[in-house]
Image: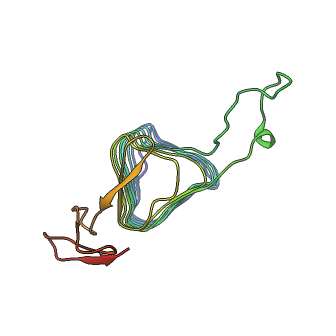
Amino acid sequence: MIHPTAEVSADAIIGENTRIWHNAQVRERVRIGKNCIIGKGVYVDFDVTLGDNVKVQNYASLYHPAVIEDGVFVGPYVCLTNDKNPRAITPDGKIKREGDWQVGQIVIRYGAALGTGSIILSNVKVGKWSLVAAGAVVTRDVPDHALVIGNPARLAGYVCKQAHRMSKINASHWKCSKCGEEIDV
């Protein structure tokens, strides 16, 4: 289902049962898996890849060449950037073109969740089942199951697959008191 107000490039590949809502823009060479939800006003830049069962909430911006694996949650107003040294112009005052900057990739791993308004800087990997808190600014890689908060984002503990905070059992072992899941970090 593609809402009539959405702009979806003919070069985009959209998986079965994926829904794209009001005023979303999906650029050329985008690959979106099956059973995804692309919310109102979402921008998906060219060459972005989304796996299956991904939910992208309203007004998120996903810039190339981001890779979002299966089962990822992207909250409202999340921004995946692609340039750590942005400028509108070159040193000699000319408008920058595509070849005038170095684009860095972001990878969001299986089952991760990005909270409302979080910003992920380029050249970062966000680990499986991790949770990025609302408003966090992620400047470096996030381990699997990590909970990161703040600006810049810092490790605040670990979460289970259901996003509950886990308790530290010893230096490397964590357990969820709600679901019983245990991990070693």
- Which residue is at a point 39% across and 45% down the rendered structure image? 21
Question: Quick check: 94 left or right of 67?
Answer: right
- Which residue is at a point 42% across and 47% down the rendered structure image? 153
Q: Which of 168 and 166 is in front in this view?
A: 168
Tell me how many marks there are: 0
Give coordinates of residue 170: x percent, y percent.
Answer: 27, 75
Give coordinates of residue 39: x percent, y percent.
Answer: 38, 45
Q: Nearer the viewer, residue 167 or 162?
A: 167
Question: Quick check: 143 left or right of 7?
Answer: left
Q: Quadrant of residue 178?
A: bottom left
Give coordinates of residue 117: x percent, y percent.
Answer: 38, 39
Residue, far top = 93
- Which residue is at a point 62% across and 50% down the rendered structure image? 64
Question: Quick check: 82 left or right of 116?
Answer: right
Image quarter in which the N terminus is found: bottom left
Residue, far right = 92
Image quarter in which the C terminus is found: bottom left
- The answer to whether 39 is drawn above or below residue 184 in the figure is above
Q: Which of 58 and 13 is in front in this view?
A: 58
Give coordinates of residue 14: x percent, y percent.
Answer: 51, 60
The chosen color scheme is rainbow
Residue, far left = 178
Question: Quick check: 165 left or right of 178?
Answer: right
